Amino acid sequence: MKRRDFIHNTAVSSAFIGLGGLSLSSFNSAETKHITILHTNDVHSYIDPFPANHPKNPNMGGVARRAALIEAIRKENSNVLLLDAGDIFQGTPYFNYYGGELEFKLMSMMKYDLATLGNHDFDNSIDGFYKQLPHATFDFVSANYDFKNTVLDGIVKPYKIFNKNGIKIGVFGLGVALEGLVDKKNSKETVYNDPVSVSQDLTRILKQEQKCDLVICLSHIGYKYKDEPNKICDVTLAGLTKDIDLIIGGHTHTFLDKPTVLKNADGKDVLVNQVGCYGINLGRIDFYLENNDAKTSKSQSIIVV
């Protein structure tokens, strides 16, 4: 959907996709609550839109357009979470010159709620990442990176819980294996742990102990690997865990036309989504909940910025 059509059509499209023809008025009862999840991944320091003569992405992307879309959606629904699945850094001269300061300041202006770390967020070393944190008004989560003996110890938490209109939303982060991707001098004493076992523990905590109504995984482990079928990815993670409602992915720069719907270990639906890279797309997932625990429907759309 092009930006010029989005604002006009979004209320209609988000109400009808996957809802069996129900009108927007069907969700006006006090028992039904509407939560909108917006997300990005692998923006890689792309601040400006692509030039008009770009062969693949002419006039696409750019922080200003994304900010305008986010503002329009927040006017439509006040119960919005804005999330990023990592690799905020590295890709344009903005990062080379400012070291991540500009990226964090702009994300703060757009009022991001939470992000996880990608492998390129270590490119100025863990100390360089830490240096830029005062410019971020949002938090970072990563459950399978153990930062115990680093400057991020106690700063990057495994998960965070939000309350939106009485709905408890637990969000946890996962990162890709650092070996072969990140120089040891940059990650220092960061320890990578198995994302599957970590996710199994975290979902139990968030669902059973913390009583979260929605559980979201911010993942930077990759959507799927055709040449490495045994490598852990979002698709396999979905099937090996339970109680995750949505996996927001990154790392593989996968452009999905719509979220993938998979079955978890209990045979229940889990959504997996990723919106490519460079801020070209903004992901949107709408949840409608009755009595806080019955997800009656989900609508999905990918917005071209």
Image (cartoon, grey):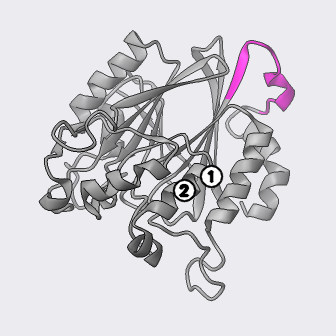
- Are the residues at dot 2 and dot 1 in contact (C-beta closer than 8 Å)? yes
Q: Residue at x 57, y 50 (%)?
A: 108
Is there any visible trace of residue 9 in the rendered image? Answer: yes
| Residue 112 relative to residue 201: left or right | right
Q: Position of residue 152 (x, y in %)?
A: 28, 42
**Is residue 26 within the magenta segment?**
yes
Q: Position of residue 32 (x, y in %)?
A: 72, 18
Q: Nearer the viewer, residue 165 or 261?
A: 165
User: For the magenta stretch, what is the residue range?
Assistant: 21-34
Disc 1 residue type? Answer: Met
Q: Position of residue 160 (x, y in %)?
A: 44, 29
Quadrant location of residue 132? bottom left
Is there any visible trace of residue 256 in the rendered image? Answer: no
Q: Secondary structure at mark 2?
A: helix
Per the image, the residue denoted by label 1 is 109
Count of labels shown? Answer: 2
Quadrant location of residue 122? bottom left
**Is residue 174 within the magenta segment?**
no
Q: Residues within 10 Å of mark 2 (few under 14, many from 20)?
A: some
Q: Secondary structure at mark 1?
A: helix
**Residue 230, above or below 241:** below
- Residue 105, disc: 2
**Residue 264, above or below 55:** above
- Residue 211, disc: none
| Residue 127 relative to residue 50: left or right | left
Q: Residue at x 49, y 55 (%)?
A: 104
Q: Residue at x 42, y 75 (%)?
A: 97
Q: Nearer the viewer, residue 38 or 272?
A: 38
Quarter of the image that includes the N terminus: bottom right
